[in-house]
Image: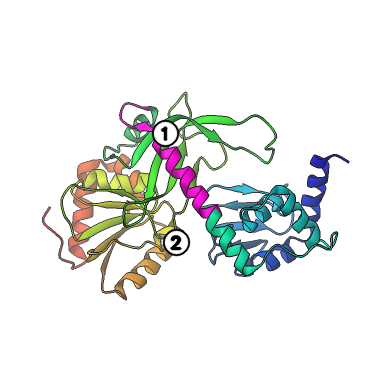
Amino acid sequence: MSARRSIADLSANLADCAESFCRQYFPEGRKQGNYWQVGDTSGAKGQSLAIRLQAQGGRKAGSWQDFATGEYGDLIDLLHARLGSVTLKETLREARSFLGEASCPALLRESRNLVRSDADSNERIAQARKLFASGKPVLGTLAAINLQRRGITRLGPALRYHPRVFLRQGEDVSGLPQRAPALLAKITDNRGQITGCARVYLDPSTGGLAEIESPKRILGQLHGHAIRFWSGTHRSDVIVGEGLENTLSVGTALPEYDLASCLTATHLGLFIPPPGIKRVWIARDNDEPGRNASMKLRNQLESQGIACGDLVPAMGDFNDDLKAFGRDALRRSLLEAMKAQGLEIEDV
């Protein structure tokens, strides 16, 4: 039997006991219907990563996707990520041990796993920094055209463009590497250190989003961090948004404000503001995940003495508003919303 076939059989066997697999390797997760939900591949608490427990609608049991990073695969891929910096051979040995096919001791030991998780995280951050450094200024590129078509004019050094970024598609990883143009955005912590790089894959012929599964993906660490756009003046408040285009749409209407984009509703609720911030304006999407994320962030920040205000679009998100009503109308609407909440706003 070939190695490829052996791995396929092993993956299928793991999928047959997907729930037991999840309970052993992701005990911080929770069962929600036909899915096991957990924060990420390290096993942290959260809901960004969903693992299908039973085959459904033509989709295989054991398939998973991290909606924060765009990563996906089968349970072999997931186990490999969970174990950290181990070889594929060691991952397969652990899978066989879980299935009772081998008598080797389990690799998943808490102390060893912490070291592996740190090493894996550091490697991803290093890759993210290297990727962003390889990009070029966004002005005049396909990425700038994509944003301008959306009515967005607020750009900045946090954005770059690369014409050929590595792209993984589908479950078959045996083919030749694929590459596609992408908008790059650097994710930073409060010290300004790059912790990750967001990739927005683009269609080279139209400049729109690439027609692939998960055209928006994240490499590195996003938890608590954000993509930041500075106004150039010292401020004690900041506008924090969900998606990149959503945040930049608000920034187009309010160029005098500092911005932080958290990319997802989950990470909006986890944002850590920089020291000295006295007020956070939460620019969320007009949906339930946005409301929940805003409430979570507000509760966290107000307990620290930081005032919060909600900015809610009339349509689905602020880019919808920008395209429908124009920059000036969006600006008036945002300023009116700020004043209506009874919070003193800085001179604009």
Image height of 282 relative to 212, above or below: below
What's the residue type where badge 1 is placed? Ser
Q: Is residue 121 magenta?
A: yes
- Which residue reaches farthest right? 1
Image height of 69 relative to 184, above or below: below
Q: According to the image, label 1 marks what residue? A: 134
Query: Splitting the image into 4 quarters, where does residue 320 fall?
Result: top left
**Residue 98: image location, x then y, percent:** 78, 62
Say which residue appears at 68% left-offset and 31% top-offset: 175
Q: Is residue 260 magenta?
A: no
Residue 59 visible in the shown view: no
Q: Is residue 250 or residue 224 the one in the foreground?
A: 224
Say which residue appears at 26% left-offset and 47% top-offset: 251
Q: Are marks 1 and 2 in contact (CB under 8 Å)?
A: no
Mark in the foreground, 1 or 2: 1
Image height of 92 relative to 113, above or below: above
- Which residue reaches farthest top? 205
From the image, give the main secondary structure of the stretch colored magenta.
helix
Q: Which mark is residue 270?
A: none
Q: Which mark is residue 288?
A: 2
Q: Which residues are magenta?
A: 120-141
